[in-house]
Every structure is written in C-alpha cells, then in structure tokens.
Image: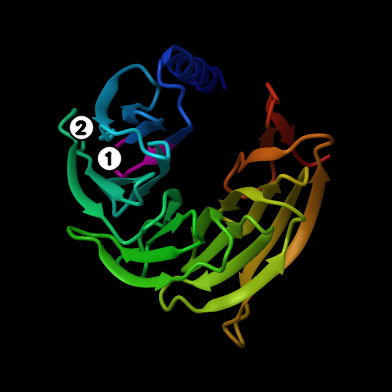
C-alpha cells in the first residue's frame, strides 16, 4: 500500500544519498525492532527501518599498506533475537548486540573461523542450540553456529573447490549455492550432506527461501531463475528437493533474486547492467 511505497522511496533515497556505494542492503527483523543494514567497502551502516535515522556506523579497519585484496563487509543476518551478524573480507564475522531501542549498538563478539572473505550469512530464529546460524566464504567453507550470549561453533563443512556464493537456512536444513552451479543441502545440526543438484550451468549468485512453504529460489549467471521445493520425507527423514518452475531472463546474468511473499508465490529478479527489477507471479 501507500505506506510501503513511502518507506521504499525513503530507503531508496538513503541508498542514493550514501557516498559509500552500498554493496548489500537487508532489513533485519529482531523481536523488538527492524533495522535496515547496509554494507560497503568502508563498513557497516544501520538505519531505522524506514531509512529516516542512522542508528549506528562501524568502520572497517583499512590496512596502512594497500593489500592485494580489497576491504569490504558482506553477508548480513539477524540472529539469536538481539544480534546482527555481518561478514568481512578478512574472514571475520562481526556480532553486534542491538538494544530494544536507541543507538547503543555494541560490537559484542568477533567470530574468527574462516580464512577467506565471507560471502553470505543466514540465520533461523527460534532454534536455540540447534545450529541457527551458518556462515559461508569464498573457498566454499561453511561454519555452523549456535547463537547466544556467546556464539558456539557446532561444526565446519570444508569447501569443495568452488566458492559458496549464497546460503539459506530452513527448518534445520542448510541450502548452499556454489560457483559451479550446484545447490547442496546439509543438516545444520550434524553437518551431513543430504542432497545435491546441478541446478545451473554457471555461477549461482542468489538463493532465497520462502519460510511458509520451503520453496527455494536460485538465480545464476546462466540467465535462469529456478524455483525448487524442499521437504522432509516423514518415513525416512531424508531431505528432498524438487524442481517446480524455471524462468529465463534473456541476455541477463542474474545477480539478485528474492521472493516477495512468505509463501513464495511471487519473486523479483535483477541482473548485471539491468537498471530495473523484474517481478514474476502467478498468471
């Protein structure tokens, strides 16, 4: 409705005014508040949900000697009811403690288990102690965490020779998209692989999940967007993945794809050098 449109225009204004050229923008939903979190080569910015007020700014430490690799923040997720986690090019994950209101945000912990730049972070609310946070890096390594006053490493899944570009978490299942076009499904508690599918011909850039239905959206450099359905077999407890739908975005390397509703009936797609967002839904 009109209120949503006003908020989107306000947020668009924040993105356009920012001198930092944000690389990522995510609304992080915590029980007490919603914050808009931006990452860039300079650091992390947090705003009120409508983009009206900056709540917090965290600058990344830039080395005095120019490094071979650029410095940036990437990967954003709300976790554990009061934390927002942000990944960095150093392989560290910054854990920010968010107060119910106000600007007294603090850096409460730094998770240092990755050796390569963080690519994505996913979290699942309400699964305390059961592996409710997963972090991914450029080497394809995944780390499984339990969030809390102190974050606990539950397990590490080594890389398979291809970067993990995107990761989502659903009902204790980790779905990860890789540079070789594969989607792999893992058990968040044990780190066991449960399924894998050659989903795309080229690099997967985006995964998203519809929490109400278990639908999985994947977008890649091969111009295709696929919709999958995740389910758990009640007899064998196996995790199953089924293909539901495909769209070809002609002459476009898809770099962003998101569901627009919790059931996954509609989704939006964008690509490199594409100045518009394409929306798809039931005919």
30 drawn magenta? yes
Task: Residue 95 in the image: state x and y as whole percent.
Answer: 26, 48
Instruction: Judge by depth and name the residue closer to the eye, 255 or 101.
Output: 255
Q: How is the image coloured?
A: rainbow
Pointer 2 residue: 101
Count neighbours of disc 1 (C-alpha within 10 A) and say few if under 14, some if 14 to 19, many if 20 or more: few
Q: Is residue 171 above or below residue 261?
A: below
Q: Is residue 274 above or below residue 243?
A: above
The residue that appears at 42% across and 79% down in the rendered structure is 190
Q: Is residue 47 above or below residue 225?
A: above
124 drawn magenta? no
Task: Residue 30 in the image: state x and y as whole percent.
Answer: 32, 43
Pointer 1 residue: 32
Count neighbours of disc 2 (C-alpha within 10 A) and say few if under 14, some if 14 to 19, many if 20 or more: few
Task: Residue 229 in the image: state x and y as whole percent.
Answer: 68, 62
Residue 271 placement, left or right of 126: right
Residue 96 placement, left or right of 165: left
The residue that appears at 56% across and 69% down in the rendered structure is 160
Residue 222 placement, left or right of 123: right
| Residue 43 in view (yes/no) | yes
For marks 1 and 2 on the same chain, the one whose residue lies earlier in the sequence: 1
Quarter of image, res 70 = top left
The residue that appears at 27% across and 56% down in the rendered structure is 111
Span of residues in magenta:
27-33
Q: Is residue 10 above or below residue 192?
A: above
Marks 1 and 2, how far apart at CA: 8 Å
Tag 1 near tag 2, CB within 8 Å: yes
The residue tagged with tag 2: helix, strand or loop?
A: loop
């Amino acid at each position: 409705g009109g209120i949503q449109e006003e908020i989107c225009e306000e947020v668009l204004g924040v993105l356009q005014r920012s001198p930092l050229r944000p690389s990522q923008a995510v609304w992080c939903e915590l029980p007490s508040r919603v914050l808009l979190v931006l990452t860039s080569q300079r650091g992390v910015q947090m705003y009120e949900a409508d983009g009206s007020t900056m709540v917090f700014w965290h600058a990344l430490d830039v080395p005095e000697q120019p490094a071979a690799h650029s410095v940036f923040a990437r990967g954003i997720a709300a976790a554990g009811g009061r934390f927002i986690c942000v990944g960095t090019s150093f392989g560290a994950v910054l854990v920010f403690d968010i107060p119910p209101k106000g600007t007294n945000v603090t850096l409460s912990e730094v998770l240092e288990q990755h050796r390569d730049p963080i690519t994505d972070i996913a979290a699942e609310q309400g699964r305390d102690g059961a592996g409710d946070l997963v972090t991914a890096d450029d080497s394809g390594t995944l780390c499984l965490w339990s969030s809390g006053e102190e974050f606990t490493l539950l397990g590490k899944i080594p890389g398979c020779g291809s970067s993990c570009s995107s990761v989502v978490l659903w009902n204790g299942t980790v779905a990860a998209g890789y540079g070789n076009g594969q989607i792999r499904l893992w058990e968040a508690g044990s780190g066991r692989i449960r399924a894998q599918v050659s989903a795309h011909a080229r690099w997967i850039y985006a995964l998203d999940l519809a929490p109400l239905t278990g639908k999985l959206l994947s977008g890649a450099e091969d111009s295709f967007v696929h919709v999958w359905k995740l389910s758990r077999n009640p007899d064998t407890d196996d995790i199953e993945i089924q293909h539901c739908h495909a769209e070809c975005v002609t002459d476009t390397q898809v770099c962003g794809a998101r569901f627009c509703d919790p059931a996954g009936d509609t989704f939006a797609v964008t690509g490199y050098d594409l100045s518009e967002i394409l929306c798809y839904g039931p005919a």
